[in-house]
């Protein structure tokens, strides 16, 4: 990492968290591609966002201060970004979209549109083991958060709401156009106050009168045991902040469960494969396999005369049922493994068994025949 992240944001190495946050917002507004048409604006905006990702996280910042980089960061975001990227977003938006919303709303921050915040969506990747026990995970994402400088009101020092002078508080303006049919009167939304009827004198300089600012949010999510792929968790009030103190939207967390190398899930049941010898299949046996929960051992009773691909059911060792103490079942698909080679003594025993059961088997092969197989004779 050759770029000085403090220099990117224009702060000193001793900058406080609040100074870093304000510097980030100022730089991001300056270089957002929607307002800055310079050829390198998009690249600089990305660099600013990545610098803030590191310096706003105490752990990452400490690592960066010590090593000049983030140890172990690899692939994608060179700073090891832990926040959700666009492929994790479902119905939500990233930092670029947040700033677009910020710049485009409320007539540049002059109006007092009391508009509720939108719901936001984010995807959360989970392993099957995590789902089997339930887990608490931290999600880091970008949103429009309430402005701390004005506590979400949008009012600056000595700021106040006043009746819009353009529409006289009606929120509508009327225009009259003369045509050959006579005068045509048209009423439209007031462009000065966006239909609210009021504007702000002395808006908050930090949020430009909107009452909300782009920021990075951290929230802990309790994922219950047994949740299924695609199911959603709603976290009230952690979506987009409302304008001028209006209600915030919710954060919708969509759970995405990764495939497992050993278990396959079917509702609350699990399927797994286990290999046994033909002796165990013939005589029956009790084998032990790993369960889905940590350190869980499952004893599987193989019935006498078990066939290849036969399924053995073990009750109560599947996935937990959502918000219940009960669990589904485990279905073990048995594979009977036939040895490719046996010792001389083992062959003699098998031949004796074949004779006792009246089965024809191949005669023992001579040493010469085996050498011919090896050398292709």
Image (tube, helix red, strand yellow):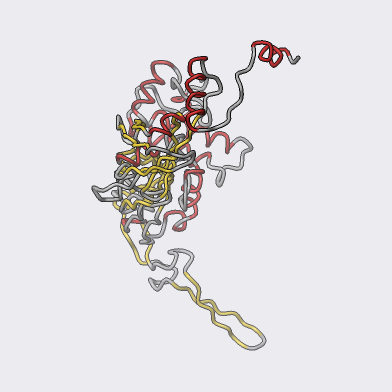
Place residue 244 in its image quadrant.
bottom left
Residue 214 spot, x, y in % from top left: 41, 44
Quadrant assignment for the C terminus:
top right
The residue depicted at 41 percent of the width and 34 percent of the height is 23
Residue 25 at least partly seen? no
Instruction: Look at the picture and state if 191 lies above or below 349.
Output: below
Q: Nearer the viewer, residue 357 or 174?
A: 357
The residue depicted at 47 percent of the width and 29 percent of the height is 356
Instruction: Look at the picture and state if 169 lies above or below 56.
Output: below
Residue 137 at least partly seen? yes
The residue depicted at 40 percent of the width and 60 percent of the height is 111
Residue 31 spot, x, y in % from top left: 53, 39
Residue 43 spot, x, y in % from top left: 57, 34
Q: Which of 337 and 242 is in front in this view?
A: 337
Q: Which of 279 and 262 is in front in this view?
A: 279
The residue depicted at 48 percent of the width and 41 percent of the height is 309
Number of marks in the rendered image: 0
């Amino acid at each position: 990492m050759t770029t000085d992240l403090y220099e990117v944001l224009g702060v000193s190495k001793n900058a406080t968290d609040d100074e870093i946050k304000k510097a980030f917002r100022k730089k991001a507004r300056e270089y957002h591609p929607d307002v800055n048409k310079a050829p390198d604006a998009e690249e600089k905006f990305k660099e600013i966002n990545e610098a803030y990702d590191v310096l706003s996280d105490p752990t990452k910042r400490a690592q960066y201060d010590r090593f000049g980089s983030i140890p172990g960061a690899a692939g994608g975001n060179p700073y090891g970004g832990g926040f959700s990227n666009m492929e994790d977003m479902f119905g939500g938006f990233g930092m670029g979209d947040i700033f677009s919303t910020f710049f485009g709303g409320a007539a540049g921050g002059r109006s007092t549109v009391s508009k509720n915040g939108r719901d936001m969506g984010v995807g959360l990747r989970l392993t099957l083991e995590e789902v089997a026990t339930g887990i608490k995970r931290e999600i880091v994402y970008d949103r429009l958060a309430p402005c701390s400088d004005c506590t979400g009101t949008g009012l600056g020092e000595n700021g106040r709401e006043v009746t819009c002078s353009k529409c006289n508080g009606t929120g509508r303006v009327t225009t009259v156009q003369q045509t050959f049919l006579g005068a045509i009167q048209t009423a439209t939304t007031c462009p000065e106050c966006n239909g609210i009827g009021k504007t702000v004198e002395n808006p908050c300089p930090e949020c430009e009168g909107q009452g909300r600012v782009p920021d990075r949010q951290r929230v802990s999510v309790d994922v219950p045991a047994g949740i299924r792929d695609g199911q959603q968790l709603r976290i009230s009030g952690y979506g987009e902040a409302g304008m001028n103190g209006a209600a915030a939207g919710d954060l919708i967390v969509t759970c995405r469960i990764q495939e497992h190398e050993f278990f396959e899930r079917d509702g609350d049941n699990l399927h797994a494969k286990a290999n046994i010898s033909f002796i165990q299949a013939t005589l029956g046996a009790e084998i032990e396999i790993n369960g889905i929960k940590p350190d869980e051992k499952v004893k599987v009773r193989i019935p006498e005369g078990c066939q290849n691909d036969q399924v053995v059911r073990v009750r109560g060792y599947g996935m937990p049922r959502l918000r219940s103490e009960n669990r589904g079942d485990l279905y073990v698909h048995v594979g009977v493994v036939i040895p490719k080679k046996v010792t001389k003594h083992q062959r003699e025993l098998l031949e004796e068994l074949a004779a006792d059961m009246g089965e024809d088997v191949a005669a023992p092969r001579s040493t010469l025949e085996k050498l011919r197989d090896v050398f292709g004779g």
